[in-house]
Amino acid sequence: MRLSQYFLPILKETPKEAEIVSHRLMLRAGMIRQQSAGIYSFLPLGKRVLDKVCRIVREEQDRSGALEILMPTIQSADLWRESGRYDDYGKEMLRLNDRHDRDLLYGPTNEEMVTDIFRSYVRSYKDLPLNLYHIQWKFRDEVRPRFGVMRGREFLMKDAYSFDIDQQSARTAYNRMFVAYLRTFQRCGLQAIPMRADTGPIGGDLSHEFIVLASTGESEVFCHRDYLGLQVPGEDIDFHDETQLQDIVTAWTTPYAATDEMHDETAWNAVPDDEKLAARGIEVGHIFYFGTKYSEPMGATVTGPDGRQMPVHMGSYGIGPSRLIAAIIEASHDEAGIVWPKSVAPFDVGIVNMKPGDADCDAACDKLYAECVAAGLDPLLDDEDTRAGAKFATMDLIGLPVQVIVGPRGAKAGEAELKFRATGDRETLPLGDVVRRLS
Ligand code: ATP
Ligand code: MG
Ligand code: MG
Ligand code: MG
């Protein structure tokens, strides 16, 4: 992509309404635009990051054996009357009427709808286990939408739903998602700690929130320092190996870790003071096992091995990709702007033409651009005729992992300067070696 052909509405002023750094930087870098309270458009740079995050989420869901579907945003109130949640959910639910005066709602979550899909087709225990997920917009009329996409009203969620014959296999389904989540957050460049959590309006009795520690987080959390050194399973993890899954989950749930609602002072006091992390955190994911809470009232049953009908055991598993972007920025930025982890960076490399119109600069930049593309890298070429200071400030703000700076003198001598965004390290290299250094 050439900057001259791109839409990157950088803001020079720091937006006053933004209270936390991720919100400020997302606005300044032209990633998002607020349309009304808690409702955002994703502009081209933001959309690229969102797509990268969703791709990681999707790959790890698929790897764990979950199957992608796509359910609508608008749901019928009747389904929610079956589970009893239409009245229980309260003001966070956006309720609508169509022209026939039928009650509809904009889905805040999809337990009822996916249970309806399940009960319409699945008849036998032999068709289990099953895990269906989608990545779809949700609406929750939050009391206090704030911090940009961190707490939006309309936000993207990956929600998965597992169906199993009994509690024990449902536990394995839970473990699969637990491990998939560890991998997902690590691939997004985040350290997310699973903490014992309250089940809230979803119901049920087994639940973990995945928390990214950050001073701007809205949750108060308590955990053991040991989590910071735990190993995340590699991509060779076997999702069919129940023992291996359970061992990982045991390792990741043994040291103390709890959110405010589940905090247990006695257990906490047993942790030595210098091993305690009492901090604030951002909830980036949340997993639940809730047994037959929806399958029973909604009649989602299968025939068991003994020929009897039984309600399926279910779990649900959410990640907020839009909130994840904000969490990544909270965890990775400096005074100059965002510092993207490679895996979610909107472009792999920024090529800075210091003097567009200069024949050597233009030729060197075009060649580098073509070589990047040929090597499978996604470059953003700044080919605009602007001041050097503005060019560097923009590149630092949008946080691409590497910048390749091409000035007239260097271009003539056949050299470019590399600047690594995270460390600030610089290297001068022959033009012909640049792309090899990047890939
Ligand atoms: P919170 O405690 O922050 O209100 P929640 O517990 O209500 O979140 P869940 O129902 O567990 O959220 O939804 C699953 C995931 O969806 C959350 O872990 C989070 O990543 C994301 N999410 C929830 N609410 C929002 C929101 N208002 N804006 C952006 N992402 C959200
Ligand atoms: Mg909430
Ligand atoms: Mg919560
Ligand atoms: Mg939650």
Image (tube, rainbow, N blue to C red):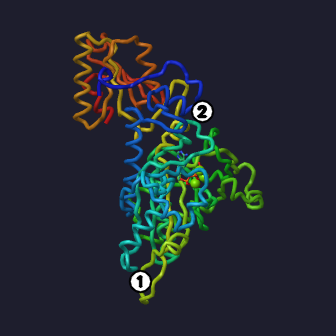
Residue in view at x 64 percent, y 44 percent: 218
Can you say which quadrant of the picture contains the C terminus? top left
Q: Position of residue 358 (x, y in %)?
A: 26, 10
Can you say which quadrant of the picture contains the N terminus? top left
Residue 232 visible in the current orientation = no
Q: Residue 389 sits in which quadrant?
A: top left
Q: How many marks?
A: 2
**Residue annotated with mark 1:** 303
Query: Vertical placement of 398 versus 183: above or below?
Result: above
**Camera-nearest residue between 40 and 176:** 40
Residues packed near mark 2 inside 10 Å, few (<14), some (14 to 19) or many (20 plus)? some
Residue in view at x 31 percent, y 30 percent: 379
Query: Vertical placement of 111 versus 191: above or below?
Result: below
**The residue under label 1 is which amino acid type?**
Thr
Query: Vertical placement of 423 versus 388: above or below?
Result: below
**Residue annotated with mark 2:** 20
Q: Secondary structure at mark 2?
A: loop
**Camera-nearest residue between 41 and 365:** 41
Direction from residue 80 to residue 227 in the image, left or right = right
Q: Position of residue 415 (x, y in %)?
A: 30, 18
Residue 117 visible in the current orientation = yes
The circle drawn on residue 151 is none
Q: Position of residue 254 (x, y in %)?
A: 62, 62
Whichever of labels 1 and 2 marks the residue nearer the N terminus, that label is: 2
For label 1, being within 8 Å of ligand 1 is answered no
**The residue under label 2 is which amino acid type?**
Ile
Direction from residue 259 to residue 290 in the image, left or right = left
Q: Residue furthest front?
A: 100
Direction from residue 256 to residue 384 in the image, left or right = left
Mark 1 and mark 2: Cα distance apart in space:
52 Å
